[in-house]
Amino acid sequence: MFGYVIPDKMNMFMKDYYNYKAYYCGLCKRIGKDCGQFMRLTTNYDMVFFDMFCHAVMEIKPNYNSEPCILSPKKKSVVKGDELTDKVVDINTLLIYYKLLDDKLDSKKSDLAKSLAKSMLKSLVVSGKYKKAKKHFPELDKLFCDEYARLRELEKQGTASIDMLADPFANMLKVAVKIVLDSKCTENIENLFYFLGKWVYIIDGIDDVDKDHKKGEFNPFFVGYTYQDKDKFYEDKGAEIEFLLMTCYNAIKSAYKNIELKFNEGAITNILWYGILMRTQDILGRKENCKKIRI
């Protein structure tokens, strides 16, 4: 459920693209500094957007530095992390922890190897970092725990409403941005992140229909529906899919129109206006497996 909120590079000014890359590298390096090098693998597009957006709202100018990467000795532009970045790192850690925990609880016996691998990852790598993040954000930790429990209960009850199933994850993003921005958070920002979370949940479900069917795992689109193959799925559900995704997209655009940013506006506008639409069109066009970070 991570890695869908990306820019549309073909419709992006070079200055905005390099600014985005600098934030990506900066967040990756900060995760490594705060959580260890292995945790840098959890760096994902969604949290880079979260980081850029929060810095823009808080009117914190990016502080660039030229640094090498662990994967390449060639120096590149990096936005140096700060206290706000540390908060984003903690939120990323909490989200990863609860995603791994939820996957473990949902894993089928037939997928024992995958379950064991994720258990080891959570135990050996994430758990120690999770304790630190929980200490910094106890109220957010409780919220994520409660919302994932609510989602599992909705799944257990066989809830057919996609809106209801998407609500827990949407609410997690909404409350997370509210806690980070505090008094700077507005109703429009809350609405933007709520519908962004709902869009991510929905598009993730659509993207995973084949995988979930083969593994016998829960998918929100399988409730009350007998899945056969992707072509038949789009034939039956195509209109509903388009309505759900475009409703979220339009709500995101509507909220963003009422948000004024002084920094990072170019990259953020590209992501919200073009990147999300591009991802939506990828799904509606039945392109195979949207690129994303899967934990």
Image: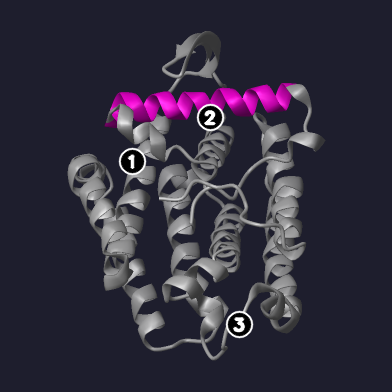
Seen at 48% across and 72% down, the residue is 214
What amino acid is labelled 2 in the image? Tyr
Residue 36 appears in view: yes
Q: How is the image coloured?
A: one colour
Q: Residues within 10 Å of mark 1 (few under 14, many from 20)?
A: many
- Residue 175 lies, in percent from the top left, at 43, 57
State the CA–CA distance, disc 1 to disc 3: 40 Å
State the CA–CA distance, disc 1 to disc 2: 16 Å
Image side of residue 67 versus residue 112, left or right? right
Seen at 26% across and 64% down, the residue is 112
Q: Secondary structure at mark 1?
A: helix
Residue 228 - label = 3
Q: Which residues are magenta?
A: 15-35
- Residue 110 lies, in percent from the top left, at 30, 71
- Residue 8 lies, in percent from the top left, at 73, 40
Q: Residues within 10 Å of mark 3 (few under 14, many from 20)?
A: few
- Residue 86 lies, in percent from the top left, at 36, 32
State the CA–CA distance, disc 3 to disc 2: 39 Å
What amino acid is labelled 1 in the image? Asp
Give the residue pinned by disc 1: 90
Image side of residue 34 versus residue 176, left or right? left
Give the residue pinned by disc 2: 24
Tell which residue pokes out farthest to the right in this image: 11
Residue 132 appears in view: no
Q: Secondary structure at mark 2?
A: helix
Location of residue 207 (image quadrant):
bottom right
Q: Earlier in the sequence, mark 1 or mark 2?
A: 2
Instruction: State the residue in front, 186 or 194.
Output: 194
